[in-house]
């Protein structure tokens, strides 16, 4: 008998980190919750990272996921912004890992292709398809919608991801 698996998707950002929690049973996806963890841009980088850490930790504790997925960072022209995003992404990887969860990583284009059907989808298309796939889904930001898309992507690719990890000898 198949049982439901709770998946956490995380869209990392220093100002706003989106999160989305879904449940998967076979091919059925169910919306659980979503939201945005924010940091105060008047605080130091270290303090902002603590805010993201604490907020994501509350999400993990409050929703008890079995697995997590985080979007890969894309490199842009502003090296400083890319580095800060990378630090926020580090927190997004660290929190579920510290909770003992397996953490998968997906490229933004794969997330878009999986959810929308094209790797260059716009934010509006992602929001619309998340609503089509999970009509009860609610989200307070594009970041939360993106996080739900990351969780959906993980639901679709987790079996092949687990097989790849097993082949590499990773538990």
Image (spheres, rainbow, N blue to C red):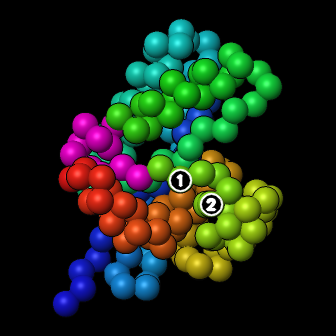
Picture coordinates of residue 91, whole percent (x, y): 42, 31
Q: Is residue 124 above or below residue 40?
A: below
Rendering coords of residue 99 (x, y %): 23, 42
Q: Is residue 96 magenta?
A: yes
Mark yes or no: residue 50 visible.
yes
Residue 45 at x, y percent in the picture: 53, 13
- 44 lies above or below 171: above
Q: Residue drawn at (41%, 52%), measured in percent from left and top?
A: 104
SS at circle 2: helix
Real-space Cα distance between discs 2 and 1?
Answer: 7 Å
Name the foreground residue: 143 vs 158.
158
Please provide the residue range marked out in magenta. 95-104
- The tag on residue 39 is none
Do the CB atoms of the residues marked 2 and 1 lie less than 8 Å apart? yes
Q: Which mark is residue 106?
A: 1
132 sits to left or right of 50: right
Q: Secondary structure at mark 1?
A: strand
Instruction: Tell me what residue is drawn at x 61 percent, y 12 percent.
Output: 42
Relative side of 64 to 92, left or right: left
Q: Which residue is mark 2?
A: 110
Q: Residues within 10 Å of mark 1 (few under 14, many from 20)?
A: some
Q: Dot 2, crowdedness within 10 Å: few (<14), some or many (≥20)?
A: some
């Amino acid at each position: 008998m198949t049982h439901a698996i709770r998946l956490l998707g995380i869209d990392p950002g220093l100002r706003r980190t989106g999160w989305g929690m879904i449940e998967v049973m076979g091919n059925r996806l169910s919306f659980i919750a979503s939201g945005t963890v924010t940091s105060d841009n008047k605080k130091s980088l270290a303090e902002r990272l603590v805010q993201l850490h604490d907020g994501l930790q509350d999400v993990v504790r409050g929703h008890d996921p079995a697995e997590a997925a985080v979007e890969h960072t894309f490199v842009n022209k502003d090296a400083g912004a890319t580095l800060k995003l990378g630090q926020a992404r580090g927190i997004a990887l660290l929190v579920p890992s510290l909770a003992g969860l397996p953490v998968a990583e997906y490229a933004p284009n794969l997330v878009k292709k999986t959810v929308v059907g094209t790797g260059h989808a716009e934010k509006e298309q992602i929001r619309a398809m998340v609503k089509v796939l999970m009509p009860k889904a609610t989200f307070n930001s594009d970041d939360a919608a993106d996080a739900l898309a990351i969780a959906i992507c993980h639901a679709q690719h987790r079996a092949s991801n687990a097989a790849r990890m097993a082949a590499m000898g990773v538990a």
